[in-house]
């Protein structure tokens, strides 16, 4: 069973849990507890005051955890930052109005950035 969990708790260490706005699990999650699984993708919408946490802290934690793609939707800058797993760090690309989000993790899925309601 695949799972898309809104506001999914993600255990990033023994001491820390994070809450992504959307966590996507592409593998069968029926056999385990969601808290023990690593999401394939995490989508985060930036809130006022959470910029450092969303852009820096969560980026490092999710990479260390093994999250394949971390997508940051920033309504204040009106950009979507897509962080795809590379060697040693995420590879970053920034999408703006006129661009289309797609991912190797979600074949066939496309989202026009212009369709977002900022």
Image (tube, rainbow, N blue to C red):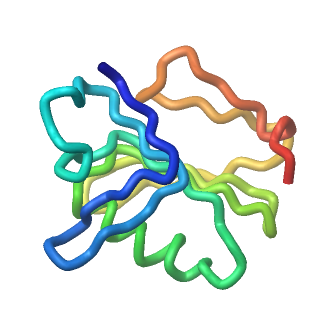
Left or right position of 7 against 15:
right
Tell me the quarter of the image containing the N terminus. Answer: top left
> Where's residue 103, x and y in %?
51, 31
Q: Residue at x 41, y 69 (%)?
A: 58
Q: Quadrant of residue 114?
A: top right
* 64 relative to 31, above or below: below
Is 53 or 21 nearer to us in this picture?
21
Q: Residue at x 53, y 72 (%)?
A: 55
> Where's residue 117, x and y in %?
86, 46
* 80 relative to 11, above or below: above
- Total label count? 0
* 20 relative to 2, above or below: below
Q: Quadrant of residue 65?
A: bottom left
Is 33 or 90 nearer to us in this picture?
33
* 115 relative to 71, above or below: above
> Where's residue 83, x and y in %?
48, 53
Left or right position of 118 against 34:
right
Q: Residue at x 18, y 43 (%)?
A: 33
Left or right position of 93 against 27:
right
Left or right position of 94 against 69:
right
Is 66 or 17 nearer to us in this picture?
17
Q: Residue at x 64, y 59 (%)?
A: 45
Tell me the quarter of the image containing the C terminus. Answer: bottom right
> Where's residue 3, x and y in %?
38, 30
């Amino acid at each position: 069973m695949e799972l898309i969990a809104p506001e999914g708790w993600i255990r990033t260490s023994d001491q820390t849990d994070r809450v992504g706005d959307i966590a996507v699990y592409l593998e069968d999650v029926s056999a385990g507890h969601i808290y023990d699984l690593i999401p394939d993708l995490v989508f985060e919408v930036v809130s006022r005051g959470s910029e450092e946490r969303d852009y820096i802290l969560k980026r490092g934690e999710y990479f260390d955890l093994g999250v394949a793609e971390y997508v940051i939707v920033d309504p204040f800058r009106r950009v979507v930052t897509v962080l795809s797993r590379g060697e040693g760090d995420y590879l970053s690309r920034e999408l703006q109005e006129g661009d289309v989000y797609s991912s190797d993790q979600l074949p066939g899925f496309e989202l026009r950035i212009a369709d977002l309601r900022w």
